[in-house]
Amino acid sequence: MPTVKFSVNGTSHSIDTDPLRRLLDVLREDLKLTGVKEGCGEGECGACSVLKDGVLVNSCMIPMGTCEGSEIITPEGLRETDQGKTIIDAYGESGAVQCGFCTPGMMMATEALLRKNPSPSEDEAREALSGNLCRCTGYDMIIDGVLKAAERGKGLW
Amino acid sequence: MVDSYRPLSLKEALELRAEKGALPFAGGTDLMVRYRYESGAIPEYPKPIMFVNHLDELRPIRRVDHGLSIGAAATMTEVLESDEVPEILKEAVVTIAAPGLRNAATLAGNICNASPAGDSICALYALDAGVKLQSRQGERILPIYQFISGPGKTDLHADELLTEIIVPHNRATTHFFKKVGTRRANALSKLSLSGVARISGDRLDEIRIAIGAVAPTVVRSIELEKRMEGRSISEVAGIAEEILRDYDTLVQPIDDQRSTAEYRKRVAMNLLRHFLLGIVLQQQGA
């Protein structure tokens, strides 16, 4: 089996794996990073969102063969940062979390947005999270959380 | 389980394509879904896979003599962020999927997938785009309307790779793109329409119209475009109803899980009427 060298949340890994295996499965099964969720498995729901080399991707769509040398950030990495803590607090205060299954992916999309655009409008926030489905909250409170994180975290991104 | 390769150059990729018949894998957003059968299982591809999205030769979006070249591995996000890309193409691309998928998906993949509902394809028809196809033997350039031959069918030879999308210099003075889908994000098109026109004084110098998801391939009629080109706006107004009737015979949609033939036909013709009568013919004196 070929070896893929990549880093996850700042730690280097060498994984012997079929290059067609999904990044999602390596993160959850090999590295036990279960903050990454599998929802639809076909790129529609965003629950498996991670940052790959700084951009938001659906890890269910990413085979390991495209991860050589990549730097991956998962929800477990994000939550240890000041930015991640700001997003978590803002979501909590906004009532943005109900069952919580979509939340890690929503937060990854929020981080990706704020890295590009630290002061988004409501429309920009909705566009940035448009690939993430939530079946509980109706989205408004999640968008409130994104905008609150941007406001609280001024200067962080 | 199939073999997979990660070529380090375009040359090596063309060798793998010729010798192993390897299936090019760029963003993977279609391939990871089409051959998936069970959560966590390796997708069952019919041929060996070769990853090409990292190849430097396939990444740039750059100006060339006759227009713009978009590398086959450039992501849709890179297309949206480029200052060089015509606005109508950006308007089409931003309706595709959502940011996470656009960070991986490519125009070349959308083209090679050859769905009649491919949103970037519809805009590329209206821009008169071409595709560069390379093999070990050389290269050829085909207009996109010749390259795509049917639903899911293209003229890509077994040893070829689509390496670039060529968008001729765009001199349109007005454009229109509309996608009709069930929701704004992550929806496949019920239908789409792209139109560009160049008007100088009161003359329609150039017009191109493409309608997606209403026939086995995107509908574009060079003959009908030529009938309008070079005429004054008032002359075009005089033949507009006749032109619309002729387009009506070309719009032959089907019923499927996303929409009905009747809905597609009516909305496509309304959008076409809006573009022609409501936009192009209102430009007089511009």
Image (cartoon, coloured by chain):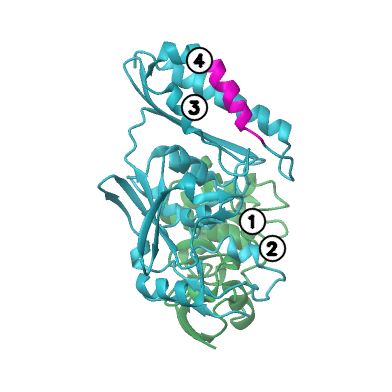
Chain colours: A green, B cyan
Q: B244 above or below B106?
A: above
Seen from the viewer's position, the closer of residues A56 and B150 is B150
Task: Give the SS element for disc 3.
Answer: helix
The amino acid sitting under disc 1 is: Glu
Residue at x-position 47% and y-position 77%: B19
Protein chain holding label 2 = A
| Pointer 1 local density, CA inside 10 Å: few below 14, some 14–19, many at least 20 | many
Q: Is residue A4 left or right of residue A61?
A: left
Residue at x-position 62% and y-position 44%: B216
- Please state the extent of the stretch shown in magenta in the rendering: B240-252
Give the labeled residue for mark 3. Answer: B224
**Residue lying at the far left of the rendered structure:** B65
- The answer to which image quadrant residue A99 occupies is bottom right
Q: Are marks 3 and 4 on the same chain?
A: yes
Q: Is residue B262 left or right of residue A81?
A: right
Return the mark for residue A39: 2
